[in-house]
Image (cartoon, helix red, strand yellow):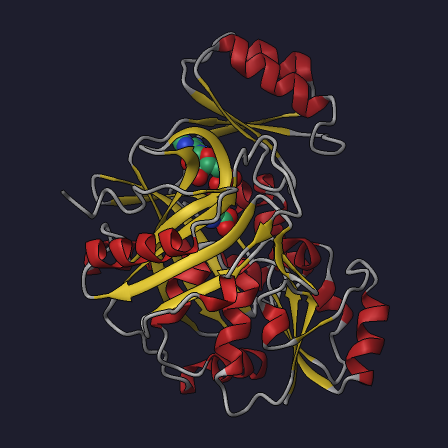
Amino acid sequence: MNVGIIGSGGREHAICYMLNKSKKVSKIFCFPGNAGTGLIAENVNLDLDNFSELEKLCTEKEIELLVVGPEKPLVNGIVDHFKGKSIKIFGPDKISSKLEGSKIFTKKICQENNIPTSKFKIFEDLKGTVNYLNECNFPLVVKADGLASGKGVYICKNFDDAKIASEEIFNGKFGSAKQILIEEFLEGEEMSYFIVTDGINYKFFGSAQDHKRVGEGDTGKNTGGMGCYSPSRLLSKDLELKIKTKIIEPTLNAINKSGGVYKGFLYVGLMIKNDEPFLIEFNVRMGDPECQTILPTLNTDLMDIFLSCCDGTLNLTNINFSRTKSVCIVLCSKGYPVEFENNIEIKDLEKLKLLKNQNIFHAGTLKTKNGFISNGGRVLNFVSTSDDFLKCRDETINLIKKLNWKNGYFRRDIGYKVIKI
Ligand code: AMP
Ligand code: GLY
């Protein structure tokens, strides 16, 4: 079967790599992909907002399954476009995708279903927001409602920070904003928990902890993710039961009741405090770099998982992960996430010798006739799996050192909470 993958990051390269191993997959097309996917699939550049154009291309290339990596097309209703057509599509529909597309939609589901999350208030204008902020204790969190490429969240230490954040949001920094969310600041340790669902049943799809800050010791600016380790050190049977019964099941039931059809990955972003889970956010896709970290530990054919989700038969598919640990370190362009240069040569990338427990997943890369060049802030994902987190990290760093990319920067402390040295 021919498959199309939408997206261009490390997550999509990891998905492409796993599908390429499946006997059920004939040819893979990536829309638009990156230099890494270009080595095993055909990259096609097209306007991803134009679903009809995409459909036409799928028909032409005999693509029978589309897998959607990032949230934007999902929130824009790509799955609804293909409803009732012969091309299967893996991802939640437009109603379900509001779980990521509108933080206020999610908070209301939490409120109506007693799902543990931070206390919150919604405001519709700056004046009302500022009046409320005058009465608040700090820190607190100010959030833009809609998609903001991970940037619409402000952790505010005092009134002035919160006022500036509210002004920026209402002034349209993240698109026209009719509403704003003010949240209580949750203390604890963050964890990401993943499931995959066919709209009826759901199954565990790994846990992870990522490092979002650019600097070692989790300092400095927020990024798309500097690295990640899996499994999370926090996960226990007891905690998992609470996550499922208090958060996931009521949410999936609420989505069903509201007429949504959720077939796809669900990323549950949690704060864990005293072994109790609190929902921070949902994402309607796999995480990046969590996906690159988790997929190399998957023993089940990923194509079987996608197809059984599309067909509503996930209960018949066993999903097995190896019990190994996994560490992913992101190699960025120097200066990311503020200012960085593109089009810098990455010499000898194809000559790097990987151990059999290692992968390199491309993100911001391009292939020219002379070799690979950088084309983004997060450039390459280096992953190692083994039975020990320290070994994973050491082997990953050794590989990055071998590449010795002069324009690169990476954090050497990924996984420091599970690696005591
Ligand atoms: P979000 O985009 O909602 O995941 O927020 C981005 C990051 O902000 C999260 O990963 C947390 O580190 C932090 N964050 C968001 N909401 C809260 C909260 N209510 N309390 C503490 N930290 C938060
Ligand atoms: N790693 C965070 C995200 O994918 O949103």
Q: Is residue 317 above or below residue 102?
A: below
In percent of the image, x 58 and y 9: which residue is there?
131
Viewer can see residue 361: yes
Give whichever of 346, 239 is nearer the camera: 346
Q: Residue furthest left?
A: 421
Give whichever of 359, 387 is nearer the camera: 359
Quadrant of the rendered image holding ligand 1: top left
Quadrant, the C terminus:
top left
In percent of the image, x 60 and y 67: which residue is there?
91
The percent position of residue 308, horizontal first and vertical second, equals 51, 83
Quadrant, the N terminus:
bottom right
Question: Looking at the image, how many numbered discs can be counted on the residues?
Answer: 0
In percent of the image, x 52 and y 79: which residue is there?
19
Q: Is residue 361 above or below residue 376?
A: below
272 relative to 141 in the view: left or right:
left
The percent position of residue 366, horizontal first and vertical second, equals 65, 58
Q: Is residue 325 above or below residue 420?
A: below
The percent position of residue 215, horizontal first and vertical second, equals 39, 32
The percent position of residue 68, horizontal first and vertical second, equals 63, 66
Viewer can see residue 118: no
The image quadrant of residue 324 is bottom left
In percent of the image, x 20 and y 61: which residue is there?
237
Q: Is residue 407 above or below residue 176?
A: below
Give whichever of 94, 420 is nearer the camera: 420
The image quadrant of residue 238 is bottom left
